[in-house]
Image (tube, grey):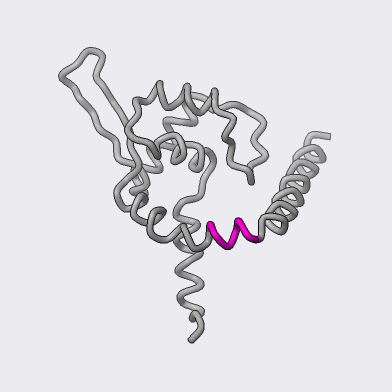
Amino acid sequence: MGISADEVLNWFDAVNWQQGEWVPEIVVALWAGQKRFLDLLKEIQESSTQHRWSNKTKPLTRQSLSQTLTRMEREELVLRHEDNSSVPRAVWYEVSPILREFLEERARPPAGWIASHQDLIERVRQSRVTREHDRHHNDET
């Protein structure tokens, strides 16, 4: 029994739900547990982990992180916690239980397939990044 077209579309829905600039870096940084905004910003800025499909040339800014976290919270990828009893107020973020469940239960089979086809994935990734870089460079000239 094969997979239906609807199931294929559902997979792409799930993948696109998790897309966005800086989303992979944020999820990786939060994977081990809750972090305050500035700690999260610093960790991502200092990390060598960058979404491998990205051609970002600019570092993460406070504004970009804030906007991305707001969108991720709205889309139920992260949870935002706030403690107004402290001064300044404490705000921290964590991966949402639904995203954690999805990644822990559903990401292993694709991760195994990707690991066994790493050469293909890397060729496609390099090709896309190169095309994006060339397109960006051509737009500037």
Q: Between 82 and 97, which is closer to the camera in this rendering?
A: 97
Query: Looking at the image, which residue is at 80% across and 43% down?
Result: 134
Residue 127 falls left or right of residue 22: right
Residue at the left extreme of this rendering: 85
Residue at (53, 57) in percent of width and height: 111
Question: Which residue is at 71% across, 59% downward?
Answer: 120
- Residue 13 point in image, percent of width and height: 46, 63
Residue 95 placed where, x, y %?
A: 35, 42
Q: Quadrant of residue 135?
A: top right
* Percent x, y of residue 101: 34, 54
- Which quarter of the rendering shows the C terminus? top right
Q: Main secondary structure of the magenta part?
A: helix
Q: Which residue sits at x=59%, y=26%?
A: 59
Q: Is residue 6 above or below residue 121?
A: below
Res 89 quadrant in image = top left
Question: Between 57 and 74, which is closer to the camera in this rendering?
Answer: 57
Q: Position of residue 137 (x, y in %)?
A: 80, 37
Q: Is residue 115 magenta?
A: yes
Label count reads 0
In the image: residue 140, left or right of residue 33 = right
In the depicted structure, whether residue 92 falls above or below residue 11 = above
Q: Is residue 26 magenta?
A: no
Magenta-highlighted residues: 111-116
Q: Residue furthest bottom?
A: 1
